[in-house]
Amino acid sequence: MRLSKRATSIKPSPTLAIDAKAKALRAKGVDVINFGVGEPDFDTPDNIKEAAIRAIKDGFTKYTPVGGIDELKEAVVEKFKKDNNLTYEKNEIIISCGAKHSLYNIAEALFDLGDEVIIPAPYWVSYPDQVLLNDATPVIVKTDEKDSFKITPALLKANTSKNTKALILNSPSNPTGCAYDRRTLEEIAEIAIAHDFYVISDEIYEKLLYDRFRHVSIASLSNEIKQRTIVVNGLSKSHAMTGWRIGFAAGPKDIISAMTNIQSQSTSNPTSIAQKAAVEALTGKQDFVPWMVSEFDKRRVYMIERLNKIKGITCLKPVGAFYAFPNVSSYYDKTFNDKPINSSFDLASYLLEEAKVALVSGGAFGDDRYIRLSYATSMENIKTGLDRIENALSNLR
Ligand code: PMP
Ligand code: GLU
């Protein structure tokens, strides 16, 4: 077989891989607690499902415009106005098959061989691989826990070159749960303008914020930064709609138009039925969202407190998303039955095999000192899973 260099330069999404592994074990009857994949454990709200059923019954089952139906673009325009104080025209919006697909379209529309793309680490798993798939070079910039894992203006400047094409920002962040404050965003925006690069701002966890943290979209800071920012968002996390595959992006119309052309040659439109459901998600009643956030908040408080009580673990309290990202590196010189544990991959495998707890190694996100646990699962699972982890770690010598 002669696969392309591109295909062999990447790995399968590790977050989806761990989820598949946990589900396969469950299917075999193994009682696995799944802290692996990041998706709300709640069902999609009924009003959204009903909108989809209506769409099917009304025969809304054919191709739609490639970049999405007008009704949904209008709802997205409204969303940006209401939530982010951002004004876009419909031709500055694209609807894609998930935020991941919007991000991929951006990478295809912007990157060429020789372009450098700055990605602060820890990063979401798909960013470097999407850059590689489009022949550009990821410039991974390690951030520090003491800066709440945010890229500092000094670090950003130090990693900027004449080849810098873009910076990928993710706030609130997967996997750290940290979020950028306005002041830092202003400094980042200044650097992007001065060095003439784009900002790809992945804001998919915008609605999942705690402790009264307020989300700021970097694009809203000035017209100058808006002109070089592509904002990505979607409904997977905010409305428990991972399987519906609806995400969207907003940005300068030439970029959106290039992304739409690319989409027209790859997937065509996102599913017609899911688009109708998305209209309802954005314009219908919103009581589900704060309810879900308050449920996540209870789990967040419990999980972070418990993790910090486990000997040798420290964990920052995240202000957003639904992940805990504890530092577990004090366990790396230990062994289990003479088998050494030297990395986050070893520890994650040990916890899956011995404790029957699935989670993702920090190495997958670019920092091997950590592991990621999703608390988008029931409190009961969280309690049992943490008991198991605590017990398994105490068995390491
Ligand atoms: N960005 C981040 C940071 C994510 O965690 C995810 C995970 N689902 C996505 C984008 C993609 O979301 P989706 O494609 O389901 O909209
Ligand atoms: N974003 C989620 C995660 O990080 C879903 C998996 C994926 O899309 O890779 O777990």
Image (spheres, rainbow, N blue to C red):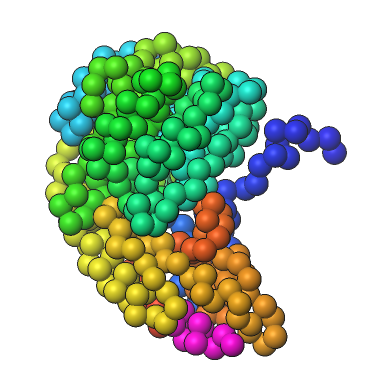
Above or below — where is 345 with respect to 65?
below
Instruction: Residue 312 in the image: state x and y as whole percent.
Output: 44, 78
353 lies left or right of 186: right
Q: Residue at x 61, y 28 (%)?
A: 136
Above or below — where is 383 with respect to 376?
below
Instruction: Residue 214 in the image: state x and y as whole percent.
Output: 18, 44
Picture quarter with ligand 1: top left
Instruction: Residue 285 in the image: state x and y as whole percent.
Output: 14, 42
Please identify the residue farthest to the top as the structure is shown.
254
Residues 268 and 343: in front is 343
Please identify the residue farthest to the right as the structure is shown.
1
Residue stretch rendered in magenta on the structure: 388-397
What is the quadrant of the N terminus in the image? top right
299 lies left or right of 214: right
Q: Quadrant of residue 140?
A: top right
What is the quadrant of the C terminus in the image? bottom right
Q: Quadrant of residue 146?
A: bottom left
Above or below — where is 62 with respect to 334?
above
Residues 244 and 87: in front is 87
Q: Is residue 279 visible?
A: no
Residues 280 and 194: in front is 194
Magenta residue check for 109: no
Above or below — where is 312 with respect to 318?
below
